[in-house]
Image: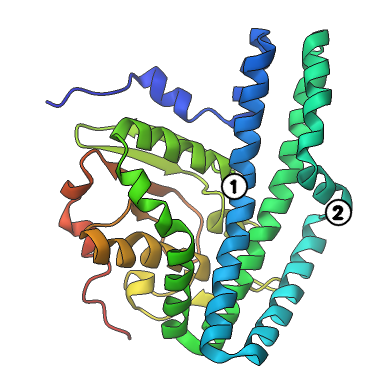
């Protein structure tokens, strides 16, 4: 039997929600440590907001390069309409945007409260920042998915795959070599932090050959399903074709198709196995999403790659 890297308590610690991490640090009384925790958690949240902007930019680049300026204008018009409707539903305000854009201004106030021993005030600062980050995060995600929805509805599955491929090359796939160069222990720590930064609720488990992160719910498409974003008035697209992008199932929220492209098709073409192996809920449904990280990535079983192999359009 392969030796395990973490105890059950250590695995549970990897899944601790950011607010609980921050509160524990505040209670320790170590001001510098708590400021470092605050900076790490704020950066993790911000990385996803920035990532959705980059995702949308990749879709924009594909659209203007493939179909021209007028097509991009039409996409951006549709994207703006959807994003504005979503913002109104969420109550996204100027104050939320100011909280996120000016997050650095919280640091002086936070440090003052920590030095004064005002633990309640410190936790309130984090709670407000986290609340604003979540609203801005969710609306930024809808923006990127609105762009994907327009591409799918206008140019079909082929256009959708092509646009996601370009976005993947510009964004997530650049991270893959750095991720795979690290130890399995460092990878599971990083992926756990990333999932928490995406406002997911997670559990982390270790097996002899792999780690598993179970998101329930995940912070993006599953929460969008729960929020009703795949129905009017937001009305994000559902991909109906039984094809590689839907793992042969059809009826998949359009955002989930990026998993087939960025985590299966493109990594398989580059290294022969998915990166990492992700299994989303079936259909337009909520439910657990599992991320499986093999300790030896090259030993990822073939059954995972087979999920997108030789699947024909219906």
**Does residue 30 appear to the left or right of 81 in the view shown?**
left
The residue shown at (53%, 27%) is: 16
Numbered disc 2: secondary structure: loop
- Are circles 2 and 1 on residues that touch, CB within 8 Å? no
Numbered disc 1: secondary structure: helix
Residue furthest right in the image: 94
Q: Find residue 74 and report its image quarter.
A: bottom right
CA–CA distance in space, label 2 to label 1: 21 Å
Q: Find residue 9 and report its image quarter.
A: top left
The residue shown at (67%, 55%) is: 138
Q: Please provide percent x and percent y for residue 262.
A: 39, 63
Count how many numbered circles sit on residues in the image: 2
At label 1, counting other C-alpha atoms closer than 10 Å, the crowd grade (few under 14, some 14-19, many 20 or more) is: some
For residue 47, the mark is 1
At label 2, counting other C-alpha atoms closer than 10 Å, the crowd grade (few under 14, some 14-19, many 20 or more) is: some
- In the depicted structure, whether residue 1 falls above or below residue 221: above
Q: Please say whether residue 249 is visible from this viewpoint.
A: no
Q: Please provide percent x and percent y for residue 203.
A: 44, 34
For residue 313, the mark is none
**Does residue 162 appear to the left or right of 223 in the view shown?**
left
* Visual colour scheme: rainbow
Q: Please provide percent x and percent y for residue 42.
A: 66, 36
Q: Quadrant of the N terminus?
A: top left
**Mark 2 or mark 1, which is nearer to you?**
1
Q: Please say whether residue 183 is visible from this viewpoint.
A: yes
**Does residue 280 appear to the left or right of 135 in the view shown?**
left
Q: Nearer the viewer, residue 271 or 243?
A: 271
**Label 2, on which residue?**
93
The residue shown at (48%, 60%) is: 171
């Amino acid at each position: 039997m392969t030796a395990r890297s973490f105890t059950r308590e250590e695995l549970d610690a990897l899944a601790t929600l950011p607010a609980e991490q921050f509160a524990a640090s505040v209670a320790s009384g170590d001001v510098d440590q708590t400021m470092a925790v605050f900076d790490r958690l704020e950066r993790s949240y911000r990385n996803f907001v920035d990532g959705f902007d980059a995702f949308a930019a990749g879709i924009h680049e594909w659209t203007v390069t493939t179909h021209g300026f007028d097509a991009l204008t039409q996409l951006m018009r549709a994207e703006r309409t959807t994003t504005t409707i979503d913002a109104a539903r969420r109550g996204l305000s100027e104050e939320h945007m100011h909280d996120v854009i000016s997050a650095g201004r919280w640091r002086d106030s936070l440090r003052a409260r920590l030095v004064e021993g005002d633990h309640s005030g410190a936790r309130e600062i984090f709670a407000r920042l986290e609340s604003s980050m979540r609203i801005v995060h969710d609306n930024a995600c809808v923006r990127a998915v609105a762009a994907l929805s327009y591409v799918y509805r206008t140019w079909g599955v082929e256009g959708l795959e092509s646009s996601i491929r370009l976005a993947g090359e510009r964004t997530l796939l650049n991270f893959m070599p750095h991720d795979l160069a690290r130890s399995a222990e460092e990878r599971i720590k990083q992926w756990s932090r990333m999932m928490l930064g995406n406002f997911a609720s997670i559990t982390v488990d270790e097996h002899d050959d792999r780690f598993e992160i179970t998101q329930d719910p995940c912070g993006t498409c599953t929460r969008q399903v729960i929020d009703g974003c795949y129905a009017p008035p937001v009305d994000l697209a559902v991909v109906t074709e039984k094809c590689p992008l839907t793992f042969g199932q059809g009826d998949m929220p359009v955002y989930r198709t990026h998993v087939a492209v960025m985590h299966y098709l493109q990594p398989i073409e580059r290294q022969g196995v998915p990166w990492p192996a992700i299994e989303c809920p079936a259909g337009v449904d909520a439910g657990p999403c599992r991320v499986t990280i093999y300790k030896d990535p090259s030993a990822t079983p073939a059954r995972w790659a087979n999920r997108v192999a030789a699947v024909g359009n219906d």
